[in-house]
Image (cartoon, grey):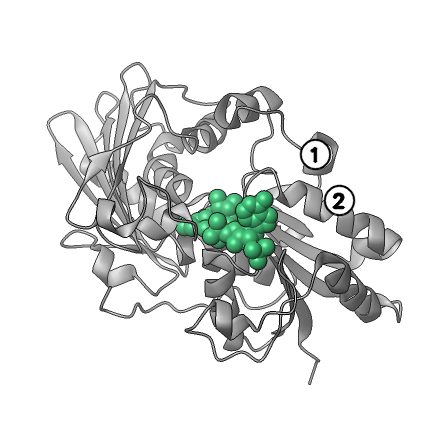
Amino acid sequence: MTQPIPTWIVGAGGMLAGELARLLEGHPDLRLEGVASRTPGVPLREIHGHLASDLVTEDAAGAARGIGSVLENGDGRAAVFLALPHGHSAAAWAGLRADLGEAAERVWVVDLSADYRLACGAAHRAAYGADAPDPEGREAFCYGLPELWPGPVREATRAAAAGCFATALQLGAVPAAAAGLLDASAPWVFHGVTGSSGSGVTPRPQTHHPHRHGNLHAYAVDGHRHEAELAQALAGGSTPPLCFVPHSGPFARGIHLTAVLPLAQGASLADARGAFAERFAGATFVDLLAEGVPQVRRVVGSNRADLALAVRGESLLVFVALDNLIKGGAGQGLQCMNLMAGLREDAGLPRSGTGVA
Ligand SMILES: NC(=O)c1ccc[n+]([C@@H]2O[C@H](COP(=O)([O-])OP(=O)(O)OC[C@H]3O[C@@H](n4cnc5c(N)ncnc54)[C@H](OP(=O)(O)O)[C@@H]3O)[C@@H](O)[C@H]2O)c1
């Protein structure tokens, strides 16, 4: 029997860190060894009350020492998840790389932030209002959305997991676009609703409970950052005007997306069904529903994205539901890690949801 791979999470206090620690509890081949935080010395279960972990947070230097000792024997490997705000992951990884020296090559890294997602510096600047923090380092990171591009993830040692809305946008549009079924001269419209956990652990006036409960409103109406990931996926093919309007929903977890995509002349619902079925053949975590529409309640707690297709007039309608904390975040990162480390893609990842949001 092979030993589990020692694993660290950096950014212990966050939403995704808590979810990842929970998923790792049931993982057969990865063992959570340490959690790094700006606040060292705090029991993880004190930060995330739902966890039964005995781990205590450590600072970045402590995590680096722990990882270093695992790598000491020359053929040791370690796994690291960066669960930090964008702009901070790259710095954390640079620090760790410097501490570990050449041994850093034997660390599998998944970044859950946006620091390494966009290949184009100008696109990153436009989306995040600042230069990409580590343009040279970015080359080593593959884009992590395994249902669409599994090959590069399998061959990589570093992955930038796709964003939560970005996952829904791409799963909903890329199969039809790649099959030439969409008209790129008319706008592709997306209406998305996300739960409050998408905004992270720190409450702000627009994101905390009294504001969101019983409420629903649009935001980022001038354009949302995650459109850049869809535009990147479409580069080299169709370059349609994209119009994604995100909304804040009155629930804690989950994303629902409706895409209204202009069909190319002659393209039919049967063509679209064929294209999606072919693209997702063998994809463990995408369910293309034969009947009905995806529902947030059915996917929360799972690493699944449910999709359904319909045609209205000249438009293809694509409905997507997923859990932002799992398929849109921690689960996607774990799926990338599994593939990079040569483990079962679904190890530690639930296909079934909890059924109650
Ligand atoms: N929430 C989602 O649904 C979701 C989905 C996909 C991707 N993401 C992305 O994944 C990353 C983590 O998301 P999250 O929702 O877990 O974020 P979060 O709840 O805001 O947590 C981020 C954690 O990073 C640490 N941190 C280190 N430096 C920080 C700084 N300067 N300011 C604030 N926090 C700092 C903190 O942990 P310590 O206090 O322990 O240091 C903090 O709790 C983000 O880049 C986010 O955009 C989030």
Taking 133 as reference, is 301 above or below it?
below
Determine whether label 1 and label 2 are within 8 Å by CB: yes
Image quarter of residue 177: top left
Taking 335 as reference, is 153 above or below it?
above
Image quarter of residue 172: top left
Quadrant housing the C terminus = bottom left
Image mark count:
2
SS class, disc 2 = helix
Q: Going by the picture, which residue comes out furthest to the bottom?
A: 1
At a point 85% along the width and 57% down the height, the residue shown is 103
At a point 69% along the width and 30% down the height, the residue shown is 135
Residue 38: mark in rendering: none
Taking 95 as reference, is 298 above or below it?
below
Q: Amino acid at mark 2?
A: Ala
Q: Is residue 150 left or right of residue 280?
A: right
Q: Residues within 10 Å of mark 2 (few under 14, many from 20)?
A: few
Residue linked to disc 1: 134
Query: Along the line of sight, which residue is nearer the eye, 268 or 132?
Result: 132
Q: Amino acid at mark 1?
A: Asp
Quadrant housing the N terminus = bottom right
Q: Residues within 10 Å of mark 1 (few under 14, many from 20)?
A: some
- Residue 142 coordinates in the image, percent (x, y): 62, 43
Residue linked to disc 2: 94
Residue 348 appears in view: no
Q: Is residue 200 left or right of residue 265?
A: right
Q: Is residue 327 left or right of residue 115?
A: left
